[in-house]
Amino acid sequence: MKKSVFALVCLIGAIFFTSCNTSKFFSQKASDIQPIALVESYSYITDAVGDFSTYYLPDASRFNQLLITDIVTSLGMPIKKTVTVDFDAEHKGSKLDSWMYNLVDISANKAQHLIVPDEIRNAVRNSGCRYGLLITDVGYSKNANQLALEEGIEVGMRIADFIFNNSVEFSKETEAYLNGVYALVFDSQTGEAVWYGSRPRRYEYNPLDRQSLTKQLTSLFKDFQ
């Protein structure tokens, strides 16, 4: 019985791990996918997620974008050019913006059927590269006031729990930062996806820290290294 329970737990853990860290080639192998044009990332960094007041941070998003460009071009991938597309993440709501943001919510299997918008496809094709690399980074970095407020609320809830239930539960619900990275490589001649990978949002990753972001991106693009 114990062995069965242990095996079930291991199976669930394995499924969870593989579902959270996915990458998939659709038609070609890594060595055939070149040259690649890196499209400057769609970076959507806010001051928090799930709070009553969440604000897009343009300076933090731009810094995240610059970090991603610098890190990815140092990973040894066959990137020949870097191109810019105006996603306008600050004024979220355009079709192009929504398309890039939706890379967060799809699986590798669904990514296979994506058709890259003409604006992005043409930017890569005009660079002289056949393949384009798209990266979406969505995360947050809370400021000191937000953390202090959340910690105060949590302490108040613990006190109330102790008064009414004579117990105290400790948790790690107040997190300073969170980040996730999602990427797609596509063929500019056809507009079709040839590879998709993701490293979903986790609390341990800071979108504004080079070491943290390097760890995410190295893991994300291991198929090409």
Image (cartoon, helix red, strand yellow):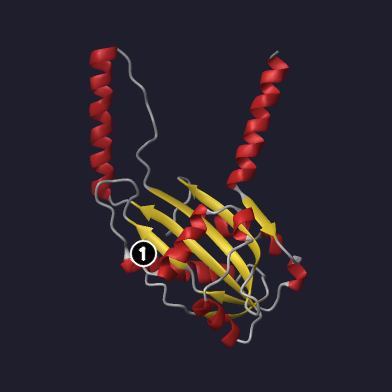
User: Is 197 or 179 nearer to us in this picture?
Assistant: 197
Q: Residue at x 48, y 46 (%)?
A: 204
Seen at 64% across and 82% down, the residue is: 129
State the image coordinates of residue 18 (x, y, percent, origin top left): 64, 44
Q: Mark yes or no: residue 83 visible.
A: yes
Which x, y percent locates residue 93? 35, 65
- Asked if 44 appears above or below 168 in the picture, the reply is below
Image quadrant where one finds the N terminus? top right
Q: Which of these two is toward me, 56 or 111? A: 111
Give the class, few, some or many, for how many residues have Cα within 10 Å of label 1's Cα (few <14, many ≥20): some
Above or below: residue 156 compared with residue 68 = above
Q: Quadrant of residue 73?
A: bottom right
Give the residue number, with chain letter if any, for mark 1.
60
Q: Is residue 175 left or right of residue 71?
A: left
Task: Tell me the residue at 28%/37% (across/down).
Answer: 151
Q: Is residue 35 left or right of residue 69?
A: right
Residue 84: horizontal and vertical position, in percent? 48, 79
134 horizontally vs 163: left or right: right
- For residue 22, side relative to residue 96 (left or right): right
Is any atom of residue 225 visible in this view? no
When the figure is inspected, residue 117 is found, relative to residue 172, above or below; the finding is below
Residue 27 placement: quadrant: bottom right
Q: Quadrant of residue 208?
A: bottom left
Quarter of the image with the C terminus is bottom right
Instruction: Answer above or below: position of 21 versus 102.
Output: above
Amino acid type at image mark 1: Ala
Provide residue 149's location: percent of width, then percent of height. 23, 41
Residue plotted at (44% across, 53% down): 206
